[in-house]
Image (spheres, rainbow, N blue to C red):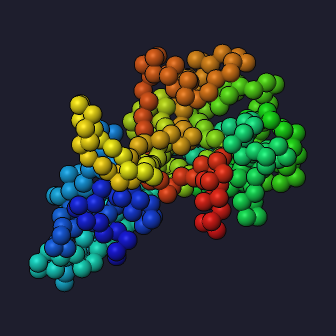
Amino acid sequence: MKKIIITDSSTLYSALQKLQDSSGTCLIVIDNKKKLLGTLSDGDVRRAILRGKKLTEKVKDVCRKKCLFVYKNSKNLSSLVNLCKKENIEIIPIVDKKKKVVNYFSSKNLGNFNLTKEDTNLEVVIMAGGIGSRLKPLTNIIPKPLIPVQDKTVIEKIIERFYNQGFERFILSINYKRNIIKSFMKNLKPKFSYEFIEEKKKLGTAGSLYFLKDKKNKNYFIINCDTIVDIEYLKLLDFHKSNKNDLTLVVSAKKFIVPYGSCKIKKNGELLQLEEKPEHHHLVNTGLYIINNQLFNYIKKEQYLDFDNFVNIIKKKKKKIGLFPISESSWSDVGKWDEYKKFLEKF
């Protein structure tokens, strides 16, 4: 039960981490006397962040204090299953007479997304054409999508996560050492379907999306070939559709620690405070997106375009851009040596 319990003095950053570690979508919030204060869903955290709440703010300011709960030995426990399904509630805390949490009822009814058959048949576009300069000299020999992780390659790891959640159609945008990637995929003999976008010249992390403009699908997953994200993709898709976004960026709550004492000074130059190894929290782009195909019309043929510049173009066109925050532990950027090593250490 400790996995889903969080104190009201905890931060939103730690709540995201705990949600990821618990593999659930809801936490039970208690006060310093271990009494029930409320519940906190991943949606509550996400909405708070999008309203401008900082990752360092406390859970008590965001949680739902008017949550449903039942007392221990209540005669109504047998009806909790139907109640959870009817109200789409994942967790109902069970408390004693002093309102201390002693247990909880959980309904793993997480599959009720407002999705169509067309949605689950979406294509996943993997941007696999980069040089991988941050991983040199390894990428002088093999392309970045084929760097090894245990007994598989990075691109296999990315595809595997989508495939295991029901997505079976993939598009690989390739340029650097593309013949090696094509040969690898052919020898893989996968169960999923795939095709290539072959860049005749380097087009950046968004330029090759031009070649999708005439395809029929309304939405596409776009992911960098060095981005491994451990989330429920259907939930992300449901979020994108429900908010009627043109583009949804998956962003990670990232903590940065300055490894030195930081000096805060007064206007006259005197020391105000010395803060030892201060922490800063930011929402950073993971390299995973859902995009509406109408946005491809803003890309010119054979135009070099990185995704950050593409986002700025879309923003100037006043298209709706949403953010889907996830925990830091849900995302690995294996395109950098230090992050690649960290990812390997998980296995």
Q: Camera-side residue: 320 or 279?
A: 279
Q: Quadrant of the C terminus?
A: bottom right
Residue 32 picture quarter: bottom left
Q: Residue at x 51, y 26 (%)?
A: 311
- The percent coordinates of residue 277 (x first, y second) are 39, 53
Q: Which residue lies most toward the left here?
A: 98
Asked if residue 343 is positioned above or below residue 283 in the image, the reply reads below
- Please indicate, yes or no, whether residue 54 appears anywhere in the rendered image: yes
- Please indicate, yes or no, whether residue 51 appears anywhere in the rendered image: no
Q: Would you say 344 lies left or right of 269 here?
A: right
- The percent coordinates of residue 325 (x first, y second) are 42, 46
Q: Camera-side residue: 150 or 40?
A: 150
Q: Quadrant of the N terminus?
A: bottom left
Q: Residue at x 60, y 38 (%)?
A: 222
Q: Camera-side residue: 193 or 30?
A: 30
Q: Would you say 327 lies left or right of 192 here?
A: left
Q: Residue at x 75, y 26 (%)?
A: 202
- The percent coordinates of residue 152 (x first, y second) are 75, 60
Q: Residue at x 71, y 60 (%)?
A: 149
